[in-house]
Amino acid sequence: MVSEAEIERLRLEADTVMTRYQTVEEALREARNEPGDHWDEEELTVTLETPQGETIEVVLDLDQDPAANAQQRYERVKELEAKLEQQQAVVGQLAPLPADPVAYRILYHLDTVEGNYPRSMAGHLDAERKQVEALCEQMETAGLLERVESGTVKQRRVKAKKADEVRQHHTYYRLSREGDHLLRFLAERDGKKNVLRHLSDGQTIAKRLARGGPDYPRMTAEELDMDFEYVRNLYRALRRVGLVTTYEGSTIKASERKLKPKDETHRKHTYYVTTSVADELLRELDG
């Protein structure tokens, strides 16, 4: 998914290259005349001062002059802006969020604990550690998460740990202001509607429940030929958003479950049904 943060990063790099044109030109000239690892990828990483006085690292193409390096970024910015506009036309404020149910669950988890690191999050969410790490990085790039400053993290800010203080040996994340705003949007009716657009498989599952009655993740995964863990995370994400809820009865009547009708189904699994809000939104989307 394209994010405004990525676009701004590329634009800043391009502006910086043009502002520090002579410095970049000299760095490229020296690198072309010296042996080194930069020849393996034909790229050179330089540290430059932005027009705002901050320091950033920029990866330059050795074969291009400063103007061409900047132009590549400006052209990429145009491409990404067009893609972002298309995304926003479909899913609105959810465009920066990876279309992955675990990304939603990370948002809600960090809203609860106020700060945590990927390995711990993976344990809390019963998700793959590498997946959580990758999503956190994507969400940070998108501006939805931010890293907690290094040092000691106070317990009041990291509720997932029980110690009074947590020595920060990991990369901790918390919600950024944009991430907090996104969660507030998800609590609104329009936010929930956009979730059904954003998570296309989530909409498929919601429609299945709305038309067929209560179902559970493993059955859904088998009948829709989807990965079980992915489906389970979809159900959990949709529940946090408020689009599905657990079926509370101990016995499911035939009139309630059209997917595999029986006189009665005694629950051995956690069954889910759509909420009234989801039913209304699905009718609107179908209309």
Image (cartoon, rainbow, N blue to C red):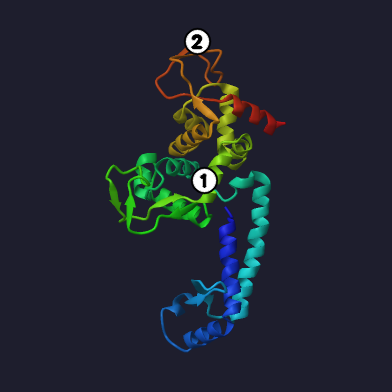
Q: For the residue carrying disc 2, how many other residues have a C-alpha within 10 Å: few (<14), some (14-19), or many (20+)?
A: few
x then y, percent, for residue 64: 58, 80
Q: Quadrant of the C terminus?
A: top right
> Mark 2 is on which residue type?
Asp
For the point 42% across and 18% down, which residue is it? 267
Q: Secondary structure at mark 1?
A: helix
For the point 65% across and 27% down, which residue is it? 280
For the point 56% across and 65% down, which residue is it? 9
> Mark 1 is on which residue type?
Asp
x then y, percent, for residue 195: 58, 39
Query: On screen, 243 above or below 39?
Result: above
Q: Is residue 216 visible?
A: yes
Q: For the residue carrying disc 1, how many other residues have a C-alpha within 10 Å: few (<14), some (14-19), or many (20+)?
A: some
Q: Is residue 44 visible?
A: no
For the point 54% across and 82% down, which residue is it? 24
x then y, percent, for residue 156: 35, 45
Q: From the viewer's perspective, tell me whether residue 248 is left or right of residue 6.
A: left
Query: Which mark is first along the chain, 2 or 1?
Result: 1
Extreme residue in the top direction: 263
Which residue is under mark 1?
180
Q: Secondary structure at mark 2?
A: loop
Q: CA distance from mark 1 to mark 2?
A: 46 Å
Residue 263 is marked as 2
x then y, percent, for residue 51: 57, 74
Extreme residue in the left direction: 163
